[in-house]
Image (spheres, helix red, strand yellow):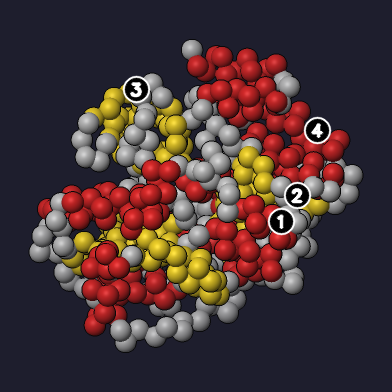
Amino acid sequence: MKYVDEFRNPQAVMHLAERIREKTRQPWTIMEICGGQTHAIVRYGLDRLLPSDITLIHGPGCPVCVTPIELIDTACRLARLSHVTLCSFGDMLRVPGTNEDLLTVKAHGGDVRIIYSPLDAIPLAQAYPEREIVLFAVGFETTAPAQAMALLQARRLGLTNLSMIVAHVLVPPAMAAILSSPYHQIQGFLAAGHVCTIMGYEEYEPLCRTYRVPIVVTGFEPLDILEGVYLAVSQLEDGRWTVENQYTRSVKRHGNPEARNIINEVFEPTDRTWRGLGIIEASGLRLREAFRSYDTLEKFRDDIAPLSTISPLPVECQSGQVLQGLLKPIDCPAFASRCTPDRPLGAPMVSSEGACAAYFRYRHQHQPISPKSR
Amino acid sequence: MCLAIPGQIQKIHQDTPLSGIVSFSGITKQICLAMVPEAKVGDYVIVHVGFAISILDERAAQASLALLHDPTVTGLIDESSA
Ligand code: SF4
């Protein structure tokens, strides 16, 4: 496949790994933000091709993993209502809430539909005017314009039986939160190529200057990731910090202006709780005033009001540490024993972008202990 | 859920919102093109949750590959664009 195969060429991968080895003179720790990149790194063993001085740590870039447990509980409660059809991406169904997940609700007769695109909710709202269609809108900046388009389309068609739980999160505030933690070990970042495809990379320039970290906007194929690492290491070895764009075939400096306009029309920034990380200022999206009638949490205020807002995570799950790159999944005591993709204790074991799931799938039989774990 | 993959536009429908047929290695799907209104048939786009989010820039892709200084890599891109 064009734009895929040529970026997986094994000789070029080895060649680039060699160039990284030549360049590296001292130890460096680099965080990849996006779970899609984590998945590719673990799947292709890219971290093992790197010199032992380079440590890749996995960031919080899995929107499923950072969705707060209160919102999962709210979605479960709504899905139990007889007149509600809850639409969600498949990854969300197995994420544990306090007492149950959406799959359990579905098994008990709740109308939970797995959608491929937010637009799939539109024909449902048209076909079942007597039902309330609830879109569980999860994702980063990449997904936000698609969710916004679904609402714009609902408004255009005059649909009033569709609403949205907006669980959207934004990447740069989370990077700032990680960098301002006194425990962080990160010296450089690979920024998420598809988030930047929408938003561009101007927002990263102040972060780069304030925290003096190289940030390289990086794609998702093996050669993209290795080139991202090469550019980050080059900056670190030369004592530079700037924003560089490795993923030029998709990312422009200002991103995609159409998509940004669509997001701005429908959403505005708000403070948001990240599962395992806590509240981060202006790190999420909510509906603008003009779209509040589509806000599920307003519409169903009476049905969900009694819900407690403090739902503790299972004590064993170390996902907060994993999401900040402070712990490798295989160093979590529950990993692959009490926590598996079939019986997940935490969200990172569920989602295909979750670091714990990636390690379970590609690593645990071969390598019980991480050589680079810290 | 964050997966975004390249596909090639085969047909454009002038509906609201703008949509088209995109082929992913032979599997075709109806995709919303509202975020890439300048797209033409034959363009490669990155598709995420049913929406094209960018038109892939062939020259930028070639330049990235050329930067890696490996003749086998540029060889591959010629093959796959045939
Ligand atoms: S392995 Fe399971 S319990 Fe441990 S951090 Fe990951 S999701 Fe949580």
Q: Position of residue A24 (x, y in %)?
A: 85, 42
Amino acid residing under circle 2: Trp
Q: Is residue A370 visible?
A: no
The first of marks 2 and 1 along the sequence is 1
Q: Position of residue A143 (x, y in %)?
A: 41, 51
Residue at horizontal 15 percent and vertical 58 percent from the top: A159
Residue at horizontal 67 percent and vertical 27 percent from the top: A10
Pointer 3: what residue? B41
Amino acid residing under circle 1: Arg
- Residue A241, disc: 2
Q: Position of residue A184 (x, y in %)?
A: 73, 66
The first of marks 4 and 2 along the sequence is 4
Q: Nearer the viewer, mark 4 or mark 2?
A: 2
Relative depth, front residue between A45 and A214: A214
Q: CA distance from mark 1 to mark 4?
A: 27 Å
- Tags 2 and 1 touching, CB below 8 Å: yes
Residue at horizontal 71 percent and vertical 61 percent from the top: A210
- Residue A19, disc: 4
Q: What's the chain of the residue with tag 1?
A: A
Same chain, marks 3 and 4? no
Helix, strand or loop for disc 2 = loop
Q: CA distance from mark 3 to mark 2?
A: 40 Å
Q: Nearer the viewer, mark 3 or mark 2?
A: 2
- Residue A209, disc: 1
Q: Nearer the viewer, mark 3 or mark 4?
A: 3
Q: What's the chain of the residue with tag 3?
A: B
Along the horizontal axis of the image, is A372 left or right of B65? right
